[in-house]
Amino acid sequence: ALLLGIPPLSRAMMRAEIEENCETLIWITTGIFLISIFLSILRPDPTLAVCLFGFYGAHTRSRGAIRAFWLYLLVSVLIDGLWLYQYSALQPFTWQQMQQMTRREQAAVALTAVNILYKLVVIGIGARLQMLLGAFEAAEGQEQSVPGASPGATSSSGRSHGASLASQDAMSLKVN
């Protein structure tokens, strides 16, 4: 875990931090999603589809989905920046030009700028969450390699479930 830039945490502390980061990711992604709904009326925006990766990844605690989400979100930030720079009515970037824009153009620029800020926050949270999930999976793998460790991570037949954290939680509830 320390190699990933994450200080060593107990399993319970790591699980709590994963839960907290997933909740934060879901709330901010919901804000991005809502802004993108209105933004898609004003200009083409791929963010709605990208947000689905975030919702899925946070719900299932899937490291791969979280990684895809923040990487695709990074690409959408670049697309938003390109749109602001090249295609928005904010050319050239001056106060006078801002005053000459229509309300619709001002709304598109403002929503895009706010969405970029939210996306940058979520990219940081997503990258951290991906590292936490990787560290948790590595800790789970080490515990499973030790005989007799972690009975909650196995089914009643003794086979290990290497799926997402959410499915491991479900299995531990069935066993207990």
Image: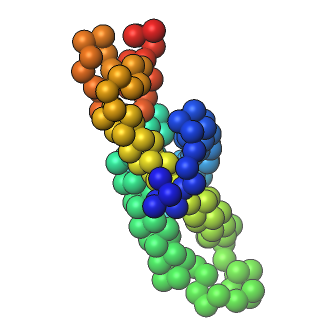
- Residue 3 higher or lower than 101, as above or below: above
- Give the percent coordinates (x, y) of residue 64: 34, 48
**47 left or right of 95 in image:** left
Q: Residue 61: x and y, percent?
A: 44, 37
Q: In which quarter of the image is residue 146?
A: top left
Residue at the spot 63% in from the left edge and 64% down from the top edge: 117
Of residues 10 and 122, the one drawn nearer to the viewer in this rendering: 10
Please state which of residues 82 and 154 is positioned toward the viewer in this rendering.
154
Please provide percent x and percent y for residue 166. 43, 29
The image quadrant where one finds the C terminus is top left
Q: Position of residue 6 (x, y in %)?
A: 54, 56
In the rendered view, tell whether residue 108 sits above or below residue 142.
below
Q: Image check: 132 left or right of 157?
A: right
Q: In this view, does 25 lie above or below 74?
A: above
The residue drawn where x is 42% and y is 32% is 165
Residue 16's image quarter? top right
- The total number of labels drawn is 0
Question: Toward the viewer: 60 or 173?
Answer: 173
Question: Image height check: is 173 above or below 30?
Answer: above
Can residue 132 be spotted in the picture?
A: yes
Residue in the image at 38% along x and 34% along y: 143
Question: Which residue in the rendered view is the most extreme toward the front?
Answer: 147
Which residue is located at x 41 percent, y 61 percent? Answer: 71
| Residue 44 seen in this snapshot | no
